Image: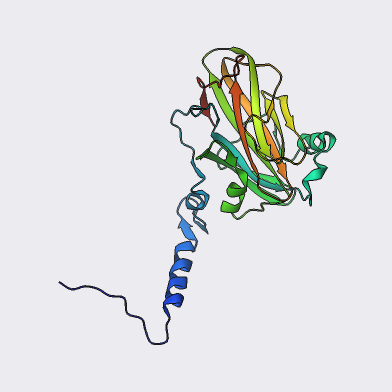
Amino acid sequence: MNIKRNVLLPGVSLAILLASAALSRSAPQHDKTNGIVGRDTTASLAPYFTPANTLKNTPDAEGFIRRWLLLEPINKPNRSNTVFTDSYLRAAFTTTYFPNQFTAVPKNGEKVKVDTQGLTWHALESNNFNIKLFRFASGLNKPTYGVLFWAVTVINSPHEIKNVRMAAGSNSASMWWLNGKETVLLSGDRRMVMDDCVSPRLTINKGKNIVWGAVINGPGMSDFCVRFLDENGMPIKNLTITYE
C-alpha cells in the first residue's frame, strides 16, 4: 500500500505552509450568481445565523422570534452609550435613512443607500434566541461599534389576539413597532435581558403583522430578543414567521 506523505521543501517551514493554507481557505470565492468575487457570507455568519428559507417557521419553544430581515449597520458614531436618552433615541429612530423605511417590507438581498453607504438586507435565522447583531456585522466585515441596526419580520396569526404584550430586550438601546405603531422603547446603556421591557396591551391582527425594530450601540456588543406574551404572561407560539 502506498502512503502519501507531505514533504517539506528545503527552507519552507511548517508554519509557512499552515499560514498559506489558512489564506487559501479564507480567500474570496467566485460568486456565480452575480459574476463578482466576494466572501462566502453563509460561512462567515456561522455559527450564529443560517440563511432564511421559505419553509414554515414558528417562534421557538419559549416564544422568541428568530427569523429576521437585518440591514447591514448604518454608521452612527457614539463614543458612549450614556447619550441614549429618550429624546436622543426618538430623534435617531424617526430620522428617514432610506426610502419606504416604515411602509414596505424589504426583500432579501435588497440594497439601500444611506448617505454614502451602500447597505444590503439579509434574511436570516438566528441559531440563538437572541439575535447577535455584533456577530452579524463582524461576519460581514462591517462596522461593529457606533452603529444603528434595522430589523423587520412578518408574523402571521390564524386569528385576532387581544391583550398581547411585546416583550423585548436589547444591547444597547432600541425601539420597536408593531404595524407602524410604537410599542417599546428601551433607553440608556443596558445589557440584553429577556423581557427587559414590555409594551402596553396590543392586538395582533388576524393574518399579516409587521414588526420593525431599531437597535443602536456605541462601544460594546449588540444583540436583541423579541417575543409576544398573552394576557396571562405566557409566550405566544401559534404564529408563523415569514420575511415577505
Q: Nearer the viewer, residue 200 or 179?
A: 200
Q: In terms of depth relative to the viewer, which is nearer, 44 or 197?
A: 197
Residue 122 falls left or right of residue 100: left
Of 87 and 150, which appears nearest the observer?
87
Q: Residue at x 69, y 46 (%)?
A: 113
Q: Give the colour scheme shown.
A: rainbow
Q: Is residue 4 left or right of residue 239?
A: left
Across and down, in percent, residue 186 comes to 73, 33
Q: Is residue 139 left or right of residue 73?
A: left
Q: Is residue 41 above or below residue 185?
A: below
In the displayed structure, would residue 101 be above or below residue 1?
above
Image location (x, y in percent) of residue 197: 69, 28
Residue lying at 82% horizontally and 43% vertically, measured from the top left: 83
Residue 227, compared with residue 125, is above or below; it is above
Q: Quadrant of the C terminus?
A: top right
Q: Position of residue 233 (x, y in %)?
A: 60, 18
- Most extreme residue toward the right, as rendered? 87
Q: List the single residue furthest toward the left.
A: 1
**Which residue is located at x 52 percent, y 21 percent?**
239
Residue 88: image quadrant is: top right
Image quarter (top left, top right, bottom left or bottom right) of the N terminus = bottom left
Q: Position of residue 226 (x, y in %)?
A: 61, 30
Image quadrant of residue 64?
top right
Report the number of numbered marks.
Answer: 0
